[in-house]
Amino acid sequence: AAFVRHAFEGGDLAPLIQERLASLRPGPAGAAGLMELGTLFQLASDRVRALECQRLALSAERLYRWSQAGSDGLKVLMLVTAGDLMTNTPLELMVEGRGVEVVRLFLDASSPMPDAVPDHDLAVMAVSESDETRPILEQLVGIEARWPRPMLNRADQVLELARDRLYHRIEGAPGLVIPPTFRMARAELVASPPDLPMILRPVGSHAGKALEKIDTPEALAAYLAAEPAERLYASPFVDY
């Protein structure tokens, strides 16, 4: 949370990166430093180095503890998976300064759940919906019914948050307008483009990256010429 705030306030990340590079240690003892370094590289828009640091950290350790809690503070266990800052719910940002201990347990589709997890008061299934996380989410469906502590979020409901599925869930709700969203291949967009104007974005993009309003066939051709993604989300433009 401190790194994210520092970055968004325009702080210089280079000294923080250098500090952690200088203090890295091998093996499990250095895993937390590598994980922090990976977060800093992500905030510095160096995704390749960020994910490599994370990969190396996870090869040594899959549990990471962050605590501002005393002995009687709330202990939260987050079920997360590897990826960039958009991959998991950023719970640390929500509970900063509230005397909460957060332990992140990293899971992946090829690794079974560990035999034991740290004691906790509350678990949070924090993996977000994407093509990359779908396999682990599908493995976690129903896990809340077997978990020994209360758990927030159900994997089957997170799966319904896909852009081309969410509007089915909430269209027709009183006072709400949500346009349909269609998952389309490049060839489909060229052969039978939706009505214009529309909004296009690559599948898997977030925070407005490569999001564009398309008003004309010429604009669509120019967008596809510049954007290499093979799969895109298209939705009617709503001027709100």
Image (spheres, rainbow, N blue to C red):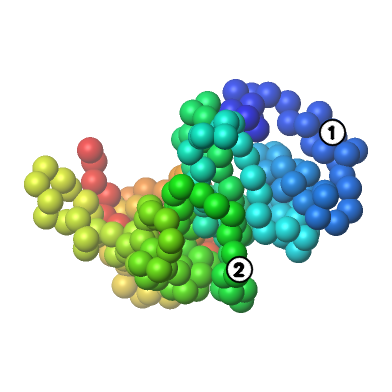
> In front here: 100 or 16?
100
Taking the spot 27% from the left edge, 49% from the top edge, the residue there is 237
- Going by the numbered disc 2, the residue's amino acid type is Pro
- Please indicate, yes or no, whether residue 212 appears anywhere in the rendered image: yes
> In front here: 8 or 104?
104
Could you tell me which secondary element the residue under label 2 belongs to? loop
Taking the spot 23% from the left edge, 54% from the top edge, the residue there is 179
Q: Which residue is mark 2?
A: 114
Taking the spot 87% from the left edge, 44% from the top edge, the residue there is 24
Of the two numbered discs 1 and 2 in the rendering, the one whose residue sits closer to the viewer: 2
Relative vertical location of residue 159 with respect to residue 26 in this rendering, above or below: below
Report whether 126 appears left or right of 116. left
Mark 2 neighbour class, 10 Å CA radius: few under 14, some 14 to 19, many 20 or more:
few
Residue furthest out toward the left? 174
Relative vertical location of residue 115 with respect to residue 25 in this rendering, above or below: below
User: Which mark is on residue 19?
Assistant: 1
The number of numbered badges drawn on the structure is 2
Could you tell me which secondary element the residue under label 1 belongs to? helix
Residue 38 in the image: state x and y as whole percent: 72, 47
Quarter of the image that includes the C terminus: top left
